[in-house]
Amino acid sequence: MNTDKIYAEHLANEYAPKDDSKVIALRKLDARAKLPATVFTYSVGIVSALIAGVGMCLSMDVIGSGSLASFVLGVIIGLIGLAGMGINYPIYKKMLAKGKRKYAFEIMELAKEISGE
């Protein structure tokens, strides 16, 4: 296998003018369908992990007064953070399905046009 030839073809394809505007439109529609779910999931995941971390710090006396009330509060806050992480994926799946349903007709029509050419 000639790797130089493969590399040269790959590089030439990168700089060649793109006539596949339908393929680009299909990729944009796909990204538009998936982006809201992805952004929401990352945001909720990061916030939930931070909340769980604060709860862990409180319960292990890293922050707070080190009293029993601080420990109990830390456990409760940590459980809230863990619950947020636990429901994140099911919400993501529902949001992704909703986005796919919203753009399904346009994506299918464009895919049929591309494959029919």
Image: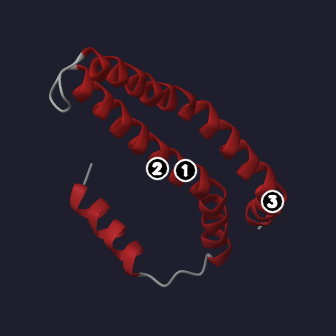
Quadrant housing residue 2: bottom left
Measured Cα–Cα span from mark 1 to mark 2: 5 Å
**N-terminal of the two: label 3 or label 2?**
2
Describe residue 113's horizontal placement relative to residue 80 as left or right: right
Q: Tell whether label 2 touches label 1 (CB within 8 Å).
A: yes
Secondary structure beneath dot 1 equals: helix
Q: Is residue 8 above or below residue 108?
A: below
Q: Mark 2 points at which residue?
A: 43
Secondary structure beneath dot 3 equals: helix
**N-terminal of the two: label 1 or label 3?**
1
Q: Report x, y in % for residue 114.
A: 73, 65
Q: As shown in the figure, which amino acid type bears the numbered disc 1?
A: Phe
Q: Residues within 10 Å of mark 2 (few under 14, many from 20)?
A: few
Measured Cα–Cα span from mark 3 to mark 2: 35 Å
Describe residue 94's horizontal placement relative to residue 2 as left or right: right
Q: How crowded is mark 1: few (under 14 residues within 10 Å), some or many (20 or more)?
A: some
Residue 40 is marked as 1
Q: In this view, does 65 lie above or below 72?
A: below
Q: Report x, y in % for residue 84.
A: 50, 32
Which residue appears at 67% of the width and 57% of the height? 33
Q: Mark 3 points at which residue?
A: 112
Q: In which quarter of the image is the C terminus?
A: bottom right
Secondary structure beneath dot 2 equals: helix
